[in-house]
Amino acid sequence: MELTPLLAVVLFLPPPLAVAHMAWTAASRRRGMRCYLLDYVCYKPADDLTLTTELACAIVQRNERLGIPEFRFLVRLISRTGLGDRTYAPRNLLDGREELAAQRDSVDEMDACFDGAVPELLARTGLRARDVDVLVVNVNGFFPEPCLASRVVRRYGMREDVAAYNLSGMGCSGTLVAVDVARNAMRARSPRPVVALVVSTESLAPHWYAGKERTMMLAQCLFRCGGAAVLLSSDQAHRGRAKMELRRLVRSTTAASDDAYSCIMQREDDDGLRGASISKALPKAALRAFAANLQRLLPRVLPAMEIARLAADLAWQNLLQRRRHRGQTKLKINLKAGVDHICLHAGGVAVIDAVKKSFGLEERDVEPSRMTLHRWGNTSASSVWYVLSWGNTSASSVWYVLSYMEAKGRLRRGDKVLMVTFGSGFKCNSCVWEVAGDMADKGAWADCIDAYPPESKPSPFLEKFTWINDEAADESSSPFWRT
Protein backbone atom coordinates (compact mmCIF):
# COMPACT_ATOMS: atom_id res chain seq x y z
CA MET A 1 0.00 0.00 0.00
CA GLU A 2 1.38 3.42 -0.91
CA LEU A 3 2.16 5.87 1.89
CA THR A 4 -0.44 8.60 1.09
CA PRO A 5 -3.49 6.28 0.93
CA LEU A 6 -2.23 4.49 4.04
CA LEU A 7 -2.09 7.76 6.01
CA ALA A 8 -5.56 8.69 4.80
CA VAL A 9 -6.96 5.36 6.00
CA VAL A 10 -5.29 5.66 9.41
CA LEU A 11 -6.29 9.30 9.99
CA PHE A 12 -9.88 9.38 8.73
CA LEU A 13 -11.27 5.91 9.41
CA PRO A 14 -12.17 4.44 12.81
CA PRO A 15 -9.46 2.00 13.99
CA PRO A 16 -11.53 -1.17 13.39
CA LEU A 17 -12.37 -0.08 9.83
CA ALA A 18 -8.78 0.99 9.18
CA VAL A 19 -7.46 -2.40 10.29
CA ALA A 20 -10.09 -4.20 8.20
CA HIS A 21 -9.26 -2.07 5.16
CA MET A 22 -5.52 -2.72 5.46
CA ALA A 23 -6.13 -6.47 5.90
CA TRP A 24 -8.38 -6.54 2.83
CA THR A 25 -5.77 -4.62 0.80
CA ALA A 26 -2.99 -6.97 1.89
CA ALA A 27 -5.09 -10.01 0.96
CA SER A 28 -5.93 -8.48 -2.43
CA ARG A 29 -2.29 -7.78 -3.10
CA ARG A 30 -1.39 -11.35 -2.19
CA ARG A 31 -4.04 -12.70 -4.56
CA GLY A 32 -2.70 -10.38 -7.24
CA MET A 33 0.74 -11.97 -6.91
CA ARG A 34 -0.55 -15.28 -8.27
CA CYS A 35 0.63 -16.27 -11.74
CA TYR A 36 -1.70 -18.47 -13.78
CA LEU A 37 -0.87 -20.04 -17.13
CA LEU A 38 -4.09 -19.63 -19.12
CA ASP A 39 -2.81 -21.44 -22.21
CA TYR A 40 0.16 -21.77 -24.55
CA VAL A 41 0.68 -22.55 -28.24
CA CYS A 42 3.73 -24.16 -29.82
CA TYR A 43 4.43 -22.91 -33.33
CA LYS A 44 4.36 -25.49 -36.10
CA PRO A 45 6.18 -24.21 -39.24
CA ALA A 46 4.78 -24.75 -42.71
CA ASP A 47 5.29 -28.17 -44.28
CA ASP A 48 7.40 -26.69 -47.09
CA LEU A 49 10.03 -25.78 -44.46
CA THR A 50 10.61 -29.44 -43.57
CA LEU A 51 14.31 -30.33 -43.46
CA THR A 52 14.63 -33.91 -44.66
CA THR A 53 17.77 -36.01 -44.49
CA GLU A 54 18.55 -35.41 -48.14
CA LEU A 55 18.09 -31.65 -47.83
CA ALA A 56 20.26 -31.44 -44.72
CA CYS A 57 23.14 -33.25 -46.40
CA ALA A 58 22.68 -31.31 -49.65
CA ILE A 59 23.06 -28.04 -47.71
CA VAL A 60 26.32 -29.28 -46.21
CA GLN A 61 27.55 -30.60 -49.55
CA ARG A 62 27.14 -27.29 -51.37
CA ASN A 63 29.54 -25.58 -48.97
CA GLU A 64 32.70 -25.62 -51.07
CA ARG A 65 34.89 -24.85 -48.07
CA LEU A 66 34.29 -28.37 -46.79
CA GLY A 67 35.93 -31.59 -47.91
CA ILE A 68 35.08 -35.20 -47.16
CA PRO A 69 36.55 -35.09 -43.60
CA GLU A 70 34.38 -32.09 -42.65
CA PHE A 71 31.31 -33.57 -44.36
CA ARG A 72 31.81 -36.87 -42.55
CA PHE A 73 32.21 -34.98 -39.27
CA LEU A 74 28.98 -33.02 -39.76
CA VAL A 75 26.91 -36.02 -40.84
CA ARG A 76 28.16 -37.92 -37.81
CA LEU A 77 27.12 -35.01 -35.63
CA ILE A 78 23.65 -34.94 -37.13
CA SER A 79 23.30 -38.72 -36.90
CA ARG A 80 23.93 -38.63 -33.14
CA THR A 81 21.44 -35.89 -32.31
CA GLY A 82 18.39 -38.12 -32.10
CA LEU A 83 16.61 -35.94 -34.68
CA GLY A 84 14.00 -37.39 -36.99
CA ASP A 85 13.23 -36.56 -40.60
CA ARG A 86 10.52 -33.92 -39.99
CA THR A 87 12.26 -30.95 -38.38
CA TYR A 88 12.11 -27.45 -39.89
CA ALA A 89 14.60 -24.91 -41.23
CA PRO A 90 14.36 -21.24 -42.30
CA ARG A 91 13.37 -20.59 -45.90
CA ASN A 92 16.63 -18.92 -46.97
CA LEU A 93 18.51 -22.07 -45.96
CA LEU A 94 16.26 -24.27 -48.09
CA ASP A 95 16.50 -21.80 -50.97
CA GLY A 96 20.30 -21.97 -51.01
CA ARG A 97 20.85 -18.49 -49.57
CA GLU A 98 22.37 -19.47 -46.22
CA GLU A 99 25.34 -17.15 -46.72
CA LEU A 100 23.28 -14.35 -48.26
CA ALA A 101 20.61 -13.92 -45.59
CA ALA A 102 19.06 -10.45 -45.49
CA GLN A 103 17.24 -8.79 -42.62
CA ARG A 104 14.01 -9.43 -44.52
CA ASP A 105 14.60 -13.18 -44.11
CA SER A 106 14.77 -12.83 -40.32
CA VAL A 107 11.76 -10.53 -40.22
CA ASP A 108 9.71 -12.96 -42.31
CA GLU A 109 10.84 -15.80 -40.05
CA MET A 110 9.68 -13.89 -36.97
CA ASP A 111 6.36 -12.88 -38.53
CA ALA A 112 5.63 -16.50 -39.45
CA CYS A 113 6.22 -17.60 -35.87
CA PHE A 114 4.19 -14.75 -34.36
CA ASP A 115 1.27 -15.38 -36.73
CA GLY A 116 1.51 -19.12 -36.15
CA ALA A 117 1.18 -18.84 -32.37
CA VAL A 118 -0.23 -15.53 -31.08
CA PRO A 119 -3.62 -15.38 -32.89
CA GLU A 120 -4.37 -19.01 -32.06
CA LEU A 121 -3.47 -18.43 -28.41
CA LEU A 122 -5.77 -15.41 -28.13
CA ALA A 123 -8.60 -17.30 -29.84
CA ARG A 124 -8.24 -20.27 -27.50
CA THR A 125 -8.36 -18.08 -24.39
CA GLY A 126 -11.12 -15.77 -25.63
CA LEU A 127 -8.99 -12.71 -25.00
CA ARG A 128 -8.11 -9.88 -27.38
CA ALA A 129 -4.72 -8.36 -28.05
CA ARG A 130 -5.94 -5.18 -26.34
CA ASP A 131 -6.53 -7.16 -23.14
CA VAL A 132 -2.76 -7.73 -22.79
CA ASP A 133 -1.14 -5.52 -20.14
CA VAL A 134 2.42 -6.88 -20.30
CA LEU A 135 4.31 -8.20 -23.35
CA VAL A 136 7.67 -10.00 -23.21
CA VAL A 137 9.32 -11.08 -26.46
CA ASN A 138 12.41 -13.27 -26.21
CA VAL A 139 14.53 -13.79 -29.35
CA ASN A 140 18.14 -14.65 -28.70
CA GLY A 141 20.03 -13.63 -31.86
CA PHE A 142 17.95 -11.06 -33.74
CA PHE A 143 17.36 -7.56 -32.38
CA PRO A 144 16.26 -5.07 -35.05
CA GLU A 145 15.14 -1.50 -34.43
CA PRO A 146 12.27 -0.96 -33.73
CA CYS A 147 12.45 -4.00 -31.49
CA LEU A 148 10.43 -7.16 -32.02
CA ALA A 149 8.23 -6.37 -29.02
CA SER A 150 7.18 -3.17 -30.79
CA ARG A 151 6.54 -5.21 -33.93
CA VAL A 152 4.17 -7.50 -32.01
CA VAL A 153 2.37 -4.49 -30.49
CA ARG A 154 1.89 -2.97 -33.95
CA ARG A 155 1.03 -6.24 -35.68
CA TYR A 156 -1.83 -7.12 -33.33
CA GLY A 157 -2.99 -3.63 -32.31
CA MET A 158 -2.20 -3.68 -28.59
CA ARG A 159 -2.95 -0.77 -26.28
CA GLU A 160 -0.69 2.25 -25.98
CA ASP A 161 -0.07 1.59 -22.29
CA VAL A 162 1.05 -2.04 -22.73
CA ALA A 163 4.35 -2.64 -20.90
CA ALA A 164 6.55 -4.16 -23.63
CA TYR A 165 9.89 -5.85 -22.91
CA ASN A 166 12.35 -7.22 -25.47
CA LEU A 167 14.95 -9.83 -24.43
CA SER A 168 17.97 -10.97 -26.45
CA GLY A 169 21.21 -12.86 -25.86
CA MET A 170 19.68 -15.10 -23.19
CA GLY A 171 20.33 -18.33 -25.06
CA CYS A 172 18.36 -21.46 -24.33
CA SER A 173 17.35 -20.33 -20.85
CA GLY A 174 15.56 -17.27 -22.22
CA THR A 175 12.00 -18.56 -22.07
CA LEU A 176 12.00 -18.87 -18.26
CA VAL A 177 13.74 -15.49 -17.99
CA ALA A 178 10.83 -14.09 -20.01
CA VAL A 179 8.32 -15.76 -17.69
CA ASP A 180 10.15 -14.26 -14.70
CA VAL A 181 10.08 -10.77 -16.24
CA ALA A 182 6.34 -11.13 -16.88
CA ARG A 183 5.71 -12.38 -13.35
CA ASN A 184 7.64 -9.49 -11.80
CA ALA A 185 5.80 -6.99 -13.99
CA MET A 186 2.50 -8.46 -12.78
CA ARG A 187 3.63 -8.25 -9.16
CA ALA A 188 4.61 -4.60 -9.60
CA ARG A 189 1.02 -3.84 -10.68
CA SER A 190 -0.63 -5.80 -7.86
CA PRO A 191 -3.40 -5.82 -6.71
CA ARG A 192 -4.66 -4.80 -10.17
CA PRO A 193 -5.24 -7.93 -12.29
CA VAL A 194 -2.75 -8.23 -15.15
CA VAL A 195 -2.61 -10.31 -18.35
CA ALA A 196 0.86 -11.00 -19.78
CA LEU A 197 1.84 -12.41 -23.16
CA VAL A 198 5.23 -14.14 -23.46
CA VAL A 199 6.62 -15.01 -26.90
CA SER A 200 9.84 -17.04 -27.20
CA THR A 201 11.53 -18.06 -30.44
CA GLU A 202 14.82 -17.86 -32.31
CA SER A 203 15.87 -16.41 -35.65
CA LEU A 204 17.97 -18.93 -37.53
CA ALA A 205 18.07 -17.22 -40.94
CA PRO A 206 21.23 -15.12 -40.39
CA HIS A 207 23.18 -17.54 -38.19
CA TRP A 208 24.44 -20.23 -40.55
CA TYR A 209 28.15 -20.84 -40.02
CA ALA A 210 29.83 -21.57 -43.35
CA GLY A 211 33.37 -22.18 -42.09
CA LYS A 212 35.19 -25.34 -41.15
CA GLU A 213 36.31 -24.82 -37.55
CA ARG A 214 34.83 -27.85 -35.84
CA THR A 215 33.89 -26.17 -32.57
CA MET A 216 31.86 -23.68 -34.60
CA MET A 217 30.30 -26.07 -37.11
CA LEU A 218 27.64 -27.21 -34.67
CA ALA A 219 25.12 -24.61 -35.86
CA GLN A 220 24.83 -26.57 -39.09
CA CYS A 221 23.12 -29.41 -37.23
CA LEU A 222 21.85 -28.08 -33.92
CA PHE A 223 19.27 -25.39 -34.75
CA ARG A 224 15.73 -25.96 -35.99
CA CYS A 225 12.75 -23.64 -36.31
CA GLY A 226 10.28 -23.38 -33.45
CA GLY A 227 8.65 -20.99 -31.02
CA ALA A 228 5.92 -20.63 -28.44
CA ALA A 229 3.44 -18.07 -27.15
CA VAL A 230 2.27 -18.22 -23.52
CA LEU A 231 -0.53 -16.28 -21.85
CA LEU A 232 -0.22 -15.58 -18.12
CA SER A 233 -2.60 -13.85 -15.73
CA SER A 234 -2.71 -12.69 -12.13
CA ASP A 235 -6.50 -12.26 -12.24
CA GLN A 236 -8.24 -14.42 -9.66
CA ALA A 237 -11.23 -14.58 -12.01
CA HIS A 238 -9.09 -16.55 -14.48
CA ARG A 239 -8.18 -19.23 -11.96
CA GLY A 240 -11.06 -21.50 -12.94
CA ARG A 241 -9.97 -21.75 -16.57
CA ALA A 242 -6.21 -21.69 -16.06
CA LYS A 243 -4.22 -24.74 -17.07
CA MET A 244 -1.43 -24.30 -14.52
CA GLU A 245 -0.23 -22.07 -11.71
CA LEU A 246 3.38 -21.01 -11.20
CA ARG A 247 4.58 -22.11 -7.77
CA ARG A 248 8.35 -21.54 -7.88
CA LEU A 249 10.88 -19.97 -10.22
CA VAL A 250 14.63 -19.99 -9.55
CA ARG A 251 17.30 -18.40 -11.73
CA SER A 252 21.02 -19.04 -11.42
CA THR A 253 23.95 -17.58 -13.34
CA THR A 254 27.67 -18.21 -12.93
CA ALA A 255 28.87 -15.50 -15.32
CA ALA A 256 31.30 -14.15 -12.71
CA SER A 257 33.49 -17.14 -13.57
CA ASP A 258 35.66 -16.60 -16.65
CA ASP A 259 35.24 -20.20 -17.78
CA ALA A 260 31.46 -20.10 -17.40
CA TYR A 261 31.17 -16.77 -19.18
CA SER A 262 33.20 -17.80 -22.21
CA CYS A 263 32.26 -21.49 -22.60
CA ILE A 264 29.68 -20.62 -25.28
CA MET A 265 30.52 -17.49 -27.21
CA GLN A 266 29.74 -16.00 -30.57
CA ARG A 267 32.93 -15.04 -32.38
CA GLU A 268 34.68 -15.00 -35.75
CA ASP A 269 36.98 -17.76 -36.95
CA ASP A 270 40.35 -17.21 -38.61
CA ASP A 271 38.62 -16.51 -41.94
CA GLY A 272 36.34 -13.87 -40.43
CA LEU A 273 33.23 -16.08 -40.49
CA ARG A 274 30.97 -15.72 -37.48
CA GLY A 275 29.67 -18.64 -35.45
CA ALA A 276 29.10 -19.96 -31.94
CA SER A 277 32.18 -21.48 -30.32
CA ILE A 278 31.88 -24.09 -27.56
CA SER A 279 34.82 -24.65 -25.23
CA LYS A 280 35.85 -27.68 -23.14
CA ALA A 281 34.94 -25.73 -19.99
CA LEU A 282 31.25 -26.14 -20.79
CA PRO A 283 30.49 -29.32 -18.78
CA LYS A 284 31.98 -27.93 -15.60
CA ALA A 285 30.21 -24.59 -16.06
CA ALA A 286 26.87 -26.26 -16.75
CA LEU A 287 27.08 -28.59 -13.77
CA ARG A 288 28.07 -25.73 -11.51
CA ALA A 289 25.07 -23.67 -12.64
CA PHE A 290 22.75 -26.67 -12.24
CA ALA A 291 24.07 -27.33 -8.73
CA ALA A 292 23.61 -23.68 -7.78
CA ASN A 293 20.03 -23.78 -9.03
CA LEU A 294 19.13 -27.03 -7.28
CA GLN A 295 20.63 -25.76 -4.03
CA ARG A 296 17.98 -23.03 -3.97
CA LEU A 297 15.13 -24.94 -5.59
CA LEU A 298 15.11 -28.28 -3.79
CA PRO A 299 14.41 -26.96 -0.25
CA ARG A 300 11.29 -25.32 -1.69
CA VAL A 301 9.87 -28.35 -3.47
CA LEU A 302 11.07 -31.51 -1.70
CA PRO A 303 9.07 -32.85 1.27
CA ALA A 304 10.59 -32.65 4.74
CA MET A 305 11.32 -36.39 4.88
CA GLU A 306 13.37 -36.26 1.66
CA ILE A 307 15.30 -33.21 2.89
CA ALA A 308 16.02 -34.99 6.17
CA ARG A 309 17.22 -38.06 4.27
CA LEU A 310 19.53 -35.92 2.13
CA ALA A 311 20.91 -34.15 5.21
CA ALA A 312 21.62 -37.49 6.92
CA ASP A 313 23.19 -38.89 3.75
CA LEU A 314 25.39 -35.82 3.37
CA ALA A 315 26.53 -35.99 7.00
CA TRP A 316 27.38 -39.69 6.65
CA GLN A 317 29.34 -39.17 3.43
CA ASN A 318 31.26 -36.26 4.94
CA LEU A 319 32.21 -38.48 7.87
CA LEU A 320 33.41 -41.25 5.56
CA GLN A 321 35.27 -38.72 3.44
CA ARG A 322 37.25 -37.48 6.43
CA ARG A 323 38.04 -41.02 7.57
CA ARG A 324 38.93 -42.55 4.21
CA HIS A 325 40.06 -39.43 2.34
CA ARG A 326 37.51 -39.99 -0.37
CA GLY A 327 36.76 -37.54 -3.15
CA GLN A 328 33.70 -35.37 -3.63
CA THR A 329 30.45 -36.53 -2.04
CA LYS A 330 27.63 -37.63 -4.34
CA LEU A 331 24.04 -37.36 -3.18
CA LYS A 332 21.22 -39.35 -4.77
CA ILE A 333 18.36 -36.87 -5.02
CA ASN A 334 14.86 -38.18 -5.61
CA LEU A 335 13.28 -35.40 -7.65
CA LYS A 336 10.05 -37.37 -8.00
CA ALA A 337 9.53 -36.99 -4.27
CA GLY A 338 8.64 -33.33 -4.87
CA VAL A 339 7.38 -33.21 -8.47
CA ASP A 340 5.33 -35.52 -10.68
CA HIS A 341 6.75 -34.65 -14.10
CA ILE A 342 10.07 -33.30 -15.35
CA CYS A 343 9.98 -30.99 -18.36
CA LEU A 344 13.65 -31.19 -19.27
CA HIS A 345 15.35 -28.88 -21.74
CA ALA A 346 15.84 -31.04 -24.85
CA GLY A 347 19.55 -30.29 -25.04
CA GLY A 348 20.73 -33.61 -26.45
CA VAL A 349 20.64 -37.34 -25.96
CA ALA A 350 23.48 -37.36 -23.45
CA VAL A 351 22.05 -34.67 -21.19
CA ILE A 352 18.78 -36.60 -21.02
CA ASP A 353 20.63 -39.81 -20.20
CA ALA A 354 22.79 -38.05 -17.61
CA VAL A 355 19.84 -36.49 -15.78
CA LYS A 356 17.95 -39.78 -15.93
CA LYS A 357 20.88 -41.61 -14.32
CA SER A 358 21.75 -38.93 -11.75
CA PHE A 359 18.22 -38.66 -10.37
CA GLY A 360 17.11 -42.27 -10.76
CA LEU A 361 14.38 -41.44 -13.27
CA GLU A 362 12.45 -43.93 -15.36
CA GLU A 363 12.37 -43.89 -19.16
CA ARG A 364 8.78 -42.61 -19.02
CA ASP A 365 10.02 -39.52 -17.16
CA VAL A 366 12.44 -38.49 -19.93
CA GLU A 367 10.37 -39.77 -22.85
CA PRO A 368 8.83 -36.30 -23.57
CA SER A 369 12.27 -34.75 -23.95
CA ARG A 370 13.51 -37.56 -26.20
CA MET A 371 10.45 -37.33 -28.42
CA THR A 372 10.71 -33.54 -28.64
CA LEU A 373 14.30 -33.99 -29.74
CA HIS A 374 13.23 -36.47 -32.41
CA ARG A 375 10.23 -34.56 -33.77
CA TRP A 376 11.29 -30.91 -33.49
CA GLY A 377 15.07 -31.01 -33.26
CA ASN A 378 16.53 -27.86 -31.69
CA THR A 379 19.62 -29.56 -30.43
CA SER A 380 23.30 -30.21 -31.11
CA ALA A 381 25.59 -33.20 -30.85
CA SER A 382 29.19 -34.16 -31.11
CA SER A 383 31.41 -37.13 -30.76
CA VAL A 384 32.29 -35.93 -27.27
CA TRP A 385 29.61 -35.83 -24.61
CA TYR A 386 30.09 -32.28 -23.42
CA VAL A 387 29.01 -30.79 -26.74
CA LEU A 388 26.19 -33.27 -27.14
CA SER A 389 24.87 -32.60 -23.70
CA TRP A 390 24.86 -28.85 -23.47
CA GLY A 391 24.72 -27.45 -26.99
CA ASN A 392 22.51 -24.44 -27.65
CA THR A 393 18.87 -25.17 -28.34
CA SER A 394 15.78 -23.20 -29.12
CA ALA A 395 14.62 -21.20 -26.13
CA SER A 396 11.10 -22.58 -26.57
CA SER A 397 11.90 -26.32 -26.51
CA VAL A 398 10.51 -26.90 -23.00
CA TRP A 399 7.05 -25.87 -24.21
CA TYR A 400 7.14 -28.62 -26.84
CA VAL A 401 8.09 -31.06 -24.08
CA LEU A 402 5.16 -29.84 -21.97
CA SER A 403 2.87 -30.10 -24.99
CA TYR A 404 3.92 -33.73 -25.48
CA MET A 405 2.93 -34.52 -21.89
CA GLU A 406 -0.41 -32.83 -22.40
CA ALA A 407 -1.06 -34.53 -25.75
CA LYS A 408 -0.42 -37.90 -24.10
CA GLY A 409 -2.96 -37.09 -21.38
CA ARG A 410 -0.44 -37.37 -18.55
CA LEU A 411 -1.17 -34.08 -16.75
CA ARG A 412 -3.84 -34.19 -14.06
CA ARG A 413 -5.14 -31.63 -11.62
CA GLY A 414 -2.72 -31.19 -8.73
CA ASP A 415 0.31 -32.60 -10.57
CA LYS A 416 3.54 -30.63 -10.23
CA VAL A 417 5.75 -30.11 -13.28
CA LEU A 418 9.42 -29.13 -13.02
CA MET A 419 10.85 -27.16 -15.96
CA VAL A 420 14.63 -26.89 -16.35
CA THR A 421 16.52 -24.83 -18.96
CA PHE A 422 20.20 -24.12 -19.61
CA GLY A 423 21.79 -21.23 -21.48
CA SER A 424 25.04 -19.49 -22.29
CA GLY A 425 26.52 -17.27 -19.64
CA PHE A 426 26.31 -19.84 -17.97
CA LYS A 427 22.69 -19.93 -16.78
CA CYS A 428 20.38 -22.56 -15.33
CA ASN A 429 16.76 -21.62 -14.73
CA SER A 430 13.99 -23.76 -13.29
CA CYS A 431 10.37 -23.43 -12.26
CA VAL A 432 7.59 -25.56 -10.82
CA TRP A 433 4.06 -25.43 -12.21
CA GLU A 434 1.01 -26.97 -10.55
CA VAL A 435 -1.68 -28.28 -12.88
CA ALA A 436 -4.87 -26.37 -12.10
CA GLY A 437 -7.16 -28.26 -14.47
CA ASP A 438 -7.13 -31.35 -16.65
CA MET A 439 -5.01 -30.78 -19.76
CA ALA A 440 -5.79 -32.71 -22.93
CA ASP A 441 -4.96 -30.48 -25.93
CA LYS A 442 -2.76 -32.14 -28.53
CA GLY A 443 -1.43 -28.82 -29.87
CA ALA A 444 1.48 -29.01 -32.30
CA TRP A 445 1.63 -32.79 -31.79
CA ALA A 446 -1.90 -33.39 -33.10
CA ASP A 447 -0.87 -34.95 -36.41
CA CYS A 448 1.76 -37.30 -35.02
CA ILE A 449 1.27 -37.94 -31.29
CA ASP A 450 -0.14 -41.43 -31.88
CA ALA A 451 3.13 -42.41 -33.60
CA TYR A 452 5.15 -41.58 -30.49
CA PRO A 453 7.13 -43.08 -28.99
CA PRO A 454 8.22 -45.07 -32.06
CA GLU A 455 9.29 -48.65 -31.55
CA SER A 456 12.79 -47.69 -32.66
CA LYS A 457 14.49 -44.46 -33.70
CA PRO A 458 17.19 -45.42 -36.21
CA SER A 459 19.08 -42.42 -37.51
CA PRO A 460 17.86 -41.60 -41.03
CA PHE A 461 21.29 -40.12 -41.72
CA LEU A 462 23.22 -43.29 -40.93
CA GLU A 463 20.72 -45.35 -42.91
CA LYS A 464 21.18 -43.25 -46.04
CA PHE A 465 24.84 -42.30 -45.63
CA THR A 466 26.47 -45.46 -44.32
CA TRP A 467 29.72 -44.61 -46.14
CA ILE A 468 30.58 -41.91 -43.58
CA ASN A 469 31.85 -44.61 -41.22
CA ASP A 470 34.31 -45.79 -43.87
CA GLU A 471 37.45 -43.87 -42.93
CA ALA A 472 39.02 -44.79 -46.27
CA ALA A 473 36.23 -43.13 -48.27
CA ASP A 474 37.17 -40.06 -50.26
CA GLU A 475 35.56 -37.86 -52.90
CA SER A 476 36.01 -40.48 -55.64
CA SER A 477 34.51 -43.34 -53.63
CA SER A 478 31.47 -41.48 -52.29
CA PRO A 479 28.41 -41.59 -54.59
CA PHE A 480 26.82 -38.72 -52.67
CA TRP A 481 29.57 -36.13 -52.87
CA ARG A 482 29.32 -33.19 -55.22
CA THR A 483 30.74 -33.59 -58.69
Image (cartoon, rainbow, N blue to C red):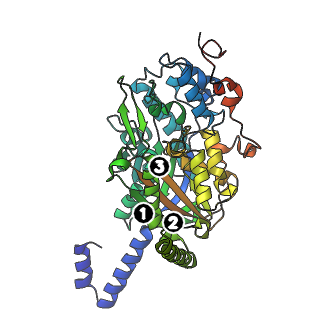
Furthest residue to the top?
483
List the single residue furthest toward the right: 455
Q: Residues within 10 Å of mark 2 (few under 14, many from 20)?
A: few
Asked if marks 2 and 1 touch (Cβ < 8 Å), the reply is yes
Q: Quadrant of the N terminus?
A: bottom left
> Please, what is the three-letter code of the amino acid marked with disc 3?
Pro
Is 129 placed left or right of 9 in the picture? right
In the visual, does 171 lie left or right of 473?
Answer: left
What is the distance, in whole Å, between disc 3 and disc 2 at their CAs? Answer: 45 Å
Task: Please say if 462 is above or below 317.
Answer: above
Image quadrant assignment for residue 438: bottom right
Q: Earlier in the sequence, mark 3 or mark 2?
A: 2
- Quick check: 78 above or below 448? above
The answer to whether one can see residue 217 in this image is yes
Classify mark 1: helix, strand or loop: loop
Q: Secondary structure at mark 3?
A: helix
Percent x, y of residue 458: 71, 37
Q: Which residue is mark 1?
A: 193
| Closest to the observer, 92 or 329 | 329
Query: Which residue matches tag 2?
Result: 237
| CA separation in Å, label 2 and label 1 | 9 Å
Image quadrant holding the C terminus, namely top right
Decide if residue 241 is on the left or right side of residue 182. right
Packing grade of label 1 (10 A; few <14, some 14-19, many >=20) is: many
Q: Circle 3 sits on which residue? A: 283
Which is more N-terminal, label 3 or label 1?
1
Q: Residue at x 37, y 77 (%)?
A: 26
Task: Establish if 298 lies above or below 147.
Answer: below
